[in-house]
Image: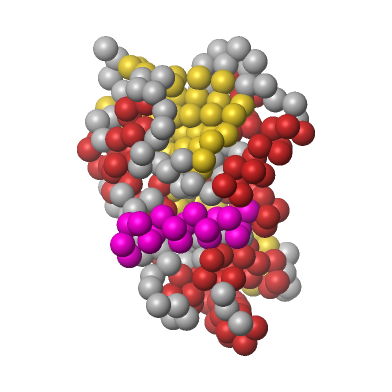
Amino acid sequence: MEPRLQRRVQRYGWNRAAEYYEDLWREQIEPAQSMLLSLVDLTGGQDVADIACGSGLVTFPAADRVGRNGSVIGTDLSEDMIRVADKAAEDRDLKNVSFRRMGAESLDLPDQSFDAVLCSLGLMYFPDPLVSMREMYRVSKPGATTAVAVWGDRKHCGWADIFPVVDARVNSDVCPMFFGLGTGGALKFTFEEAGFSAVEIVRISTVLHYQSAEEACMAAFAGGPVALAYSRFDEETREGAHAEYLESIEPYRVDDSYEIPGEFVLGVGRRTAA
């Protein structure tokens, strides 16, 4: 997919998903996000950037850790995700958090300005992940830590057939490189090519819990990366896609619920101190 088109698909797709995302994915991705935060070991007074922040699921706990003398800025390509995050920050009366819409491949942020940079489950959506990693390196201070989480190897993610199910019903691949960074040494290579040193990679297995077929389908189709394509399906197309996807996750059905395996890959690296 041409990069400009891919960015548009992601932007408007996540706009569509914004209202469903937290309810359907908070529990499922919490293990990756908790591990991500533990890898950077934030302390009071630090300045942090959260790239592809979505609704702020990592941004807010990061803000708690840096305290009122620190700051966290969340960036995302989706204006609706930013709107959801802004509202949550306002409701919590948080003064050390801000959100801005911007693309990860061209961050409108100063050089060497952050003590830590985070990116939770966003890197695999960017047209050029290496360019994005170089931007994270650019905005990090000497000695700063950057931590990234991506989904793992396709064969370890039981929900992976969502992509061919949708791709069979649209004119182009929705997320053609989705599992690439979680395969082999790809994430470590990307860190090192961007300039980071002391790179460490962690793989963790997880289980996605859904209480019903409807909930599993809503998460896969309406609450994630295929939301834009799904929004354009007529009722007959939706029913066919649901049936095919449910068939693919049938091995993980337990009575009326689903226990779907998944894998996260996390990487952490440092910008060499000056």
Specify the quadrant of the image occupied by residue 19: bottom right
Residue range in magenta is 1-18
Question: Can residue 180 be spotted in the picture?
Answer: no
Quadrant where the C terminus sits is: top left
User: How is the structure coloured here?
Assistant: secondary structure
Instruction: State the residue in front, 199 or 236.
Output: 236
Specify the quadrant of the image occupied by residue 266: top left
**Side of 271 relative to 166 (left or right):** left
Q: Residue at x 57, y 34 (%)?
A: 99
Eyeballing the image, is 43 above or below 119? above
Q: Residue at x 40, y 77 (%)?
A: 171
Q: x and y percent of residue 148 in the render?
A: 42, 39
Q: x and y percent of residue 231 in the render?
A: 59, 71
Q: x and y percent of residue 262 in the render?
A: 51, 57
Question: Can residue 82 be spotted in the picture?
Answer: yes
Instruction: State the residue in front, 172 or 12.
Output: 12
Classified by dominant secondary structure, the portion drawn in magenta counts as helix
Q: x and y percent of residue 140 in the render?
A: 37, 24
Specify the quadrant of the image occupied by residue 144: top left
